[in-house]
Image (cartoon, rainbow, N blue to C red):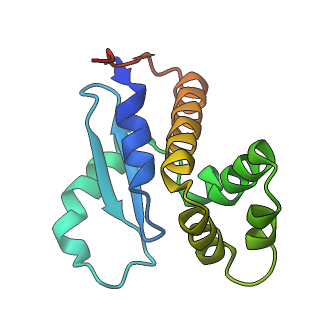
């Protein structure tokens, strides 16, 4: 089993879409994407070989999807840490994702939020690796 970088998993989590699933090949460390049945914009025949390989091999593990990640909870945690009523108001009501994004941009803390979010993705990646017994390490900071 190949050791993976937490940051590579976190980067993949940032690219999570609701009509795609991502898988880690435990032997190579490669992350591959596969359209799910809700994706009507893709020719599934193009991915048939990969789908068969994933289905009939023990080498692949599905990465967390957008529902596993639950970005709303990440936004809530950030709002709680900042103790800023504007962020809580943005999360309540219609279109909380859009209003939260607008709020962090208007307040001038978007960069701070995206760092917080990325660290949350790293935590999710670490927990996922541990749950799936995937050896991992962190990249050297330069």
Q: Nearer the viewer, residue 18 or 75?
A: 75
Q: Is residue 4 above or below residue 19?
A: above
Residue at x 75%, y 53% (from the top left corner): 79
Give the number of marks.
0
Residue 72 placed where, x, y %?
69, 60
The reply to whether residue 60 is visible in this rendering is: no
Residue 27 placed where, x, y %?
28, 25
Residue at x 28%, y 29% (from the top left corner): 29
Q: Is residue 109 left or right of residue 28?
A: right
Residue 103 placed where, x, y %?
63, 69
Outermost residue to the left: 46
Residue 24 position by quadrant = top left
Q: Is residue 13 left or right of residue 50?
A: right
Q: Nearer the viewer, residue 83 or 123?
A: 83
Q: Quadrant of the C terminus?
A: top left
The reply to whether residue 117 is visible in this rendering is: yes
Q: Quadrant of the N terminus?
A: top left
Residue 13 placed where, x, y %?
45, 48
Q: Is residue 93 left or right of residue 32?
A: right
Residue at x 79%, y 55% (from the top left corner): 84
Q: Nearer the viewer, residue 109 or 113?
A: 109
Q: Is residue 88 above or below residue 116?
A: below
């Amino acid at each position: 089993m190949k050791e993976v970088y937490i940051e590579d998993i976190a980067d993949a989590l940032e690219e999570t879409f609701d009509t795609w699933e991502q898988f880690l090949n435990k032997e190579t460390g490669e992350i591959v994407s596969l359209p799910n049945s809700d994706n009507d914009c893709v020719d599934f025949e193009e991915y048939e070989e990969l789908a068969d390989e994933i289905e009939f091999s023990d080498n692949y593990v599905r990465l967390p999807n957008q529902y596993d990640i639950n970005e709303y909870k990440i936004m809530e945690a950030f709002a709680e840490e900042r103790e800023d009523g504007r962020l809580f108001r943005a999360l309540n009501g219609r279109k909380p994702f859009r209003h939260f994004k607008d709020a962090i941009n208007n307040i001038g803390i978007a960069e701070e939020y995206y760092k917080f979010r990325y660290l949350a993705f790293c935590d999710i990646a670490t927990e996922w690796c541990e749950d799936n017994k995937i050896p991992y390490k962190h990249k050297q900071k330069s």
